[in-house]
Structures are given as structure tokens and as C-alpha cells.
Amino acid sequence: MPRPIEALVHTDALRHNLARARAGAGDARVWAVVKANAYGHGIERAFEGLRGADGFALLDLAEAERLRALDWRGPILLLEGCFEPRDLELCSRLHLWHVVHCTEQIDWLAAHKTHEPHRVFLKMNSGMNRLGFTPAAFRSAYARLVALPQVDEVSLMTHFSDADGPRGVAHQVAAFQAATADLPGERSVSNSAAILRHGLRNDWVRAGILSYGSAPDFPEHDIAHWGLQPAMTLRSRVLAVQALAPGDTVGYGSSFTAERAMRIGIVACGYADGYPRHCGTGTPVLVQGRRTATVGRVSMDMLAVDLTELPEAGPGSEVTLWGRGPGGTILSIDDVARAAGTIGYELMCALAQRVPVHVSD
Ligand SMILES: Cc1ncc(COP(=O)(O)O)c(C=O)c1O
């Protein structure tokens, strides 16, 4: 019998979340952002739930090839564009739209022999200082691109640094609008937080984390607030039960000491499965759908949970590390991420290879 741990990808939740993105996007078309192997869910596994999107946005050319192998014929956008000149050949062959964020990428296009002109998204660095042309350099980059025979359509985009927080997006929106006001072309500015919090629409929105059922601005708002559903469940079972007397300790480093008699369950899940080692005592977990908490340090293959108030739980009991539990219960990945001092994005992307993943409808 295999270890009892498994992950589930919920097609219905992906569909639901995408519909949520559409509701927030008005008339804008929706990119489902599926970089990092669909945020850890697996492109092939997430495809059915997300195929109602207007396009897919990602970074890796190999992932774009996988989407075409699924017979996706609609738009695919490479969010970082080409990494070297010969990537343009694949863009031509697979009809990939690509971001242009630096002068070198324009030089490569100018030297590229293509039968069909390319659609590009010219990216502005409106304040995040990651990728893109500054507002001052944007117009000359635009002029160069529209003059190239290799290019038939130039769209305009930028990315927000603070759509999920108090600084907001106004300063970046102002910079973007000032530099692009009289330029023709479709626009794309919004990630999940901008869709949900700022209602910014333009022509295309880029729905990443919300599609997977994690709140971009947790803990200010949670998935219930935004009407999102977890698209990934990580679940396992209790392998063994230990009875603790006051003063007994649990796990490596004896970081937890029982102050009273306790029952703990040892669960087949550890950091080698992608469960964060930084989750200390008190991280929420569901056992048979009832909320309890971890005790002690997470080890490579196991962690311990408090069963003191759950006398019916024992070896074989189902444990939900995040996602959907039995009887309609839910433990948001955001709650677990917070206990690890991180964000839901990181946990879903870090699901380990060794965990078997199944698609559930
Ligand atoms: C350029 C770009 N657009 C959109 C997204 C999607 O962001 P989110 O997952 O917060 O919706 C990302 C993700 O980091 C991105 O880099």
C-alpha cells in the first residue's frame, strides 16, 4: 500500500474561480495565469477547469508547448517574452504572443525571419522595477516595434507591486496612463488583487492566484470574502497515536512540551511532501473535518496533530492539510501559509513531486 498522502486538483473549483475572475473583469478578456506548472497544480490537470479562459499566460516555452499539445488553439502569452533569439522561432511556430520588456528583445525581433508577424505586449516598468521600459523609454520602444515588419500588433501592459496592500495601484496607473494615453493598442494591467480590490479591467486581466482559490490579500480578506474555492487539497491519514503525560515532548528538538495529558496523532506528511517546516505548533489542520492544530516540529515525512478533543480520531483518520475536508469543511491554504510566515502561492507551488496528484470533479 502506498503512503496515504495525496493531493487533489478540483476542476469544479477552478471553473468557479475563473467565473469569479470573469465577474470581476467586466468585458475584459481573462488570461488564466498558469506559470510554474499552473501554480503547482499541473498544467494538464488544471486545463479542464481553466479552459474556459480566453487565453493562458505563462513563462516557460516548454509549458506553452504542453498547452498546445492539449490542443489549446487560443492565445498563449509569454509573460517574460523570449529568453534568447531562437525562442522567436517557437513563438512563430506555436503562435505565441510574447511580452517585450527590454531593448534586446526588440533587436532579436528585428533580426527574426518570420512568415507571420508577431503579436507582442510591450511592458512598462511603472514602478515595480522588475521588468519593462520606464515611462520615458516606453514611447520610443513602441515606435520601434510598430515599425517592424515582424510585428503586426502591439499591446500595452504593466504589472503592479502593491495591488494587494495599502499602497495600492494609483501611482502606477497614473504613470501608465500618462505615458500611453494617445497610443493605440489593447491594454492589460490587472493581476488577481487588482481585479478583486481595484476593479481594474482594461482589455485583458491576468488572473493567477485567485484561479487557484487563495486570497491575494490575505489576511485582510480571505477566500470566503472573495467567494473563492480551494483548487488544491492536500490530505493524508493518521499513522499512529501517542498518549502524552504532562512534561512529555514531541518530535525533533523537543520544541513542544505537553502541559497536560494529551493524545496526539502522527500524520503521514512532512516537509519532503511540500508541507512547510516553518509551521510551528498551532498550525491549523482538519482531522475528519474537525479543526485542530499541529504540535511540535514538522519532520521530513511526518507531523503531529492534537487529537485530545477528538476521541473518535485514531489510526487511519483522514487529515486535511489544506483544501477540502470531509462534509464540506474547508481549510484555506492561506491559513497554513500564514503559520509558515509565507503566502499561499509558495505552498501550492512547492507541492513535492513524490505526492501523487489526482484530478477530482
Ligand atoms: C506579469 C504577471 N501578471 C500576472 C500575474 C498573476 O498574479 P496573481 O497570481 O497575483 O494574480 C503575475 C504573477 O506573478 C505576473 O508576474
Image (cartoon, rainbow, N blue to C red):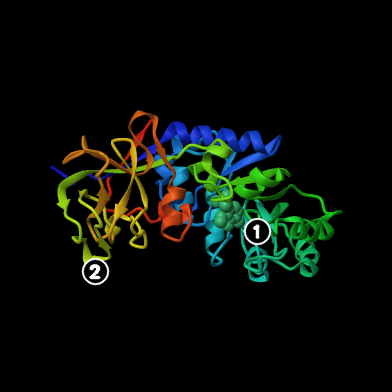
**Location of residue 174 in the rendering, given as x and y in whole percent from the top left corner:** 80, 58
Circle 1: element type: loop
Residue depth check, mark 2 versus mark 1: number of the one nearer the observer: 2
Taking the spot 54% from the left edge, 67% from the top edge, the residue there is 84
Per the model, the C-alpha gap separating discs 2 and 1 is 38 Å
Classify 165 as above or below 67: below
**Left or right side of 241 for 358:** right
Classify 12 as above or below 306: above
Between 244 and 98, the residue placed more toward the observer is 244
**Which element is circle 2 on?**
helix
Within 10 Å of the Cα at label 1, are there few (<14), some (14-19), or many (20+) other Cα atoms? Answer: some
User: Quadrant location of residue 26?
Assistant: top right
Q: Are marks 2 and 1 in contact (CB under 8 Å)?
A: no
Give the class, few, some or many, for how many residues have Cα within 10 Å of label 2's Cα (few <14, many ≥20).
few
- Image location (x, y in percent) of residue 78: 57, 54
Q: Which residue is tagged 1?
A: 162
Q: Give the x, y percent position of residue 166.
A: 68, 57
Residue furthest toward the right?
Answer: 182
Residue at image position (66%, 57%) is 160
Q: Position of residue 264 (x, y in %)?
A: 21, 49
Is residue 212 visible in the rendered image? The answer is: yes
Identify the amino acid type marked 2.
Gly
Up the image or down, 172 lies above or below 292; here it is below
Q: Is residue 21 left or right of residue 134?
A: left
Q: Please state which of residues 151 and 62 is positioned toward the viewer in this rendering.
A: 62
Look at mark 2 in the image and give the residue it sits on: 253
Disc 1 marks which amino acid?
A: Asp
User: Which is more N-terminal, label 1 or label 2?
Assistant: 1
Picture quadrant where residue 169 is located: bottom right
Q: Look at the image and tell me in which quarter the N terminus lies.
A: top left
Q: Closest to the observer: 56 or 220?
A: 220
